[in-house]
Image: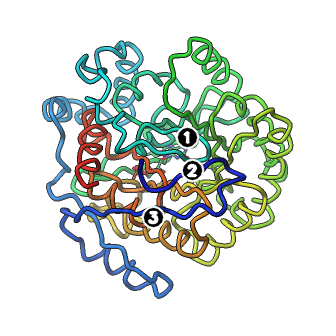
Amino acid sequence: MICTQRTSAAAAAGHAPARRRVLRHTGRPSRSHCAKVAGDPSTSHPVPALSPSSVPPPAIGLWRILRPLLFRLEAERAHQLGLLLARLLPAALTAPSGRRHAGSDVAGSATLATRVMGLDFPNPLGLAAGVDKDAEALGFWQALGFGFVEVGTVTALRQPGNPRPRVFRLPPDGALINRMGFPNDGADVVATRIERLRQQETLRVPLAINIGKSKATPAADAAADYRRSFERLGELADFVVVNVSSPNTPGLRDLQSVDQLRGIVDAVQTPNQTLARPRPLLVKLAPDLADADALACARAALQAGCAGLVVSNTTVDFSTATTATAGMSGGLSGAPLFARSTALLRLLRESLGSSPVLIGVGGVMDAASANAKLAAGADLIQLYTGLIYGGPALPRTLLRGLATAR
Ligand SMILES: Cc1cc2nc3c(=O)[nH]c(=O)nc-3n(C[C@H](O)[C@H](O)[C@H](O)COP(=O)(O)O)c2cc1C
């Protein structure tokens, strides 16, 4: 068992985190990353920058051959192709038979298993929101070794998202910039898909569903819109993430004010508390909030009954990327996000104590960065951009690194 044990969202209080071991960072520090965090007086422990040690970050195994081919395609087209293969490939193909025998698969090893929010996670590494927005390939992510999967962002209304192109690679930085704008099938369709999966009982890892505001819904009706999504999806999830931090839906991040956030969480809690087993709720925060504002939001969310926070979404601050980004808009993810998202994570853990569940996401590219998130106070971690650069073998490679460090 690792790090922390939490019996339930409500009973989380009072569980002190156990030891957290740290791997040494192998990435070479980038001056711009260090300067940003070191210059922030409110951050008591500056987080070292993490930047890929090779350019672009190393692909693992077969991905060394496939990545250059896929990187010739427009980024979203490559993603869609990957998703199509992920849907079609039987899970058995992606989980070599030897690994399925008890004890031989690092993704299910007792060393990495953890219990958080009353849920059993085979390991603490999850797939971040946005990779599989519509819950199309859950068996595949599980077969890659992820210890949990977050689908979404799903909105109450089906929507197309922003015009393409809307995802861009920054290989020298090990980064992406996206302005997707929550394209998704809508809560009804995604719920039907997950209902089918639940009936088949093929899902062995916890499932998080990330909900966001429909673009067509006016800000004044945001709380009701989140509630609608929760009413359709909440019971199908093991826990629910309330996303108020994407930079790509106009006005969404304004919902990160204490009053707005409280209104949204209250609106979701109303149907949640009628469930036989109310689901733990987490709020996903932006790394661009000032520390004091992030802390105020986090406290408001916890006071409204949330179990914790997901830290963080992408950043609109492109200054940590070395690639030219003039004229680009959207959210930056990957290695250049590591320092700020980890500093915010650490600040929240230090300020809020051991009770809230914290999921650390942003720039997890390898075992060292994953371990640094855990050391900064994360109970669980997630990645998105790392998968694009490292490839499908990354989860198990990373987990082997984590297991070795324990
Ligand atoms: C193309 C793309 C789409 C994303 N879509 C979502 C989304 O729909 N909802 C969400 O909460 N986060 C979304 N994210 C943010 C990720 O979940 C994650 O918070 C962020 O990318 C930082 O993690 P990373 O550095 O490992 O990529 C998206 C990120 C990318 C790159």
Q: CA distance from mark 2 to mark 1?
A: 8 Å
Residue drawn at (42%, 17%), measured in percent from left and top? 87
The answer to the question of whether label 2 and label 1 lie on touching residues, with beta carbons closer than 8 A, is yes
- State the residue position of label 1: 162
Q: Is residue 144 at all visible to an observer of this figure? A: yes
Q: Quadrant of residue 55?
A: bottom left
Label 3, on which residue?
341
Q: Which amino acid does the dot numbered 2 rest on?
A: Asn
Residue 4 picture location, percent across and down: 50, 55
- Image coordinates for residue 395, horizontal then vertical, percent: 31, 39
Closer to us: mark 3 or mark 1?
A: 3
Q: Secondary structure at mark 3?
A: helix
Residue 117 or residue 209, whichever sits in front: 117
- Residue 37: where, in percent of width, then height? 39, 78
Which amino acid lies under the numbered mark 1 shown in the image of this protein?
Answer: Asn
Secondary structure found at label 2: loop
* Between discs 3 and 1, the one toward the N terminus: 1
Look at the numbered disc 3 and say if its residue's Cβ is closer than 8 Å to ligand 1.
yes
Q: CA distance from mark 3 to mark 1?
A: 25 Å
Categorize mark 3 by other alpha carbons within 10 Å: few (<14), some (14-19), many (20+): many
Helix, strand or loop for disc 1 = loop
Residue 248 badge:
2
Residue 288 lies left or right of residue 101; in this view the side is right
Tag count: 3
